[in-house]
Image (cartoon, rainbow, N blue to C red):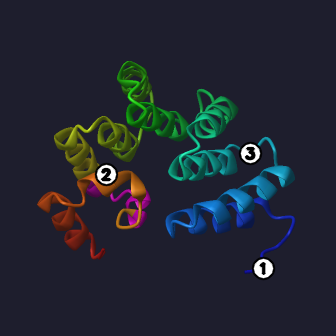
């Protein structure tokens, strides 16, 4: 697929689509070239980190998610939530819980999408809290739920009837 070579946004979206279609190696290649176009843009760093994670390259995943989080520090909590979920998956539960506390403090001063809590809870294996957060996101009509059926973050929830029910209510299918 050809995209505008100088548009970091279009190139990031292509990387995201590759990620969601679970073509992680292709996503990594795409997002690396996107970062060459816009090294200070947090968004491709985040998706690159997520892509690294699902190829098993956890050190690079942490590095990219930390970069992304640093680029939007105190502005956008999404990369921080992704880092918390990754820490949880790596068995660093204390770090993940600390990030949940950070997100909670953040939510006291501004809106934090419940989806961000759901991904960390899912990483921690706290299914009830993950579903409670997903239900809040559903009630908020959160647009990030549009990718719920293909988001690998929630693979551990697929066998739960609540997951299929939520997808049904949203008009999504697995």
Q: Name the spot of residue 6 as percent of width and height, x first.
A: 87, 64
Q: Residues within 10 Å of mark 2 (few under 14, many from 20)?
A: many
Please provide the residue range marked out in magenta. 138-147
- Counting every numbered tag in the picture gives 3
Q: Which mark is residue 154?
A: none
Tag 3 secondary structure: loop
Name above or below for residue 126 compared with residue 155: above
Gap in Å between the C-alphas at discs 3 and 2? 26 Å
Write down the quadrant of residue 108 in the picture.
Answer: top left
Residue at image position (68%, 43%) is 42
Q: Name the spot of residue 139 as percent of width and height, x first.
A: 25, 55
Q: Viewer-nearest of labels 3 and 1? A: 1
**What residue did someone put label 3 on?**
41
Q: Is residue 105 left or right of residue 129?
A: right
Gap in Å between the C-alphas at discs 1 and 2? 34 Å
Q: Which mark is residue 137?
A: 2
Q: Residues within 10 Å of mark 3 (few under 14, many from 20)?
A: some
Q: Name the spot of residue 121 as percent of width and height, x first.
A: 30, 38
Quadrant (top left/top right/bottom left/bottom right) for the N terminus:
bottom right
> Are the residues tagged 3 and 2 within 8 Å (C-beta)?
no
Tag 1 secondary structure: loop
Residue at image position (32%, 57%) is 155
Q: Is residue 10 left or right of residue 85?
A: right
Name above or below for residue 35 compared with residue 109: below
Q: Report the magenta stretch's main SS.
A: helix
């Amino acid at each position: 697929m050809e995209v505008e070579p100088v548009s970091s946004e279009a190139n990031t979206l292509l990387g995201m689509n590759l990620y969601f279609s679970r073509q992680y190696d292709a996503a990594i290649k795409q997002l690396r070239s996107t970062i060459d176009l816009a090294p200070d843009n947090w968004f491709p760093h985040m998706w690159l980190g997520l892509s690294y994670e699902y190829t098993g390259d956890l050190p690079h995943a942490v590095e990219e998610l930390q970069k992304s989080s640093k680029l939007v520090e105190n502005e956008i909590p999404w990369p921080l939530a992704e880092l918390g979920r990754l820490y949880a998956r790596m068995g660093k539960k204390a770090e993940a819980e600390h990030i949940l506390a950070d997100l909670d403090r953040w939510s006291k001063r501004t809106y934090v999408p419940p989806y961000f809590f759901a991904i960390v809870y899912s990483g921690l294996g706290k299914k009830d809290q993950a579903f409670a957060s997903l239900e809040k996101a559903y009630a908020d009509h959160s647009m990030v739920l549009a990718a719920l059926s293909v988001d690998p973050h929630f693979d551990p929830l697929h066998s739960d009837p609540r997951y299929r029910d939520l997808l049904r209510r949203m008009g999504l299918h697995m």
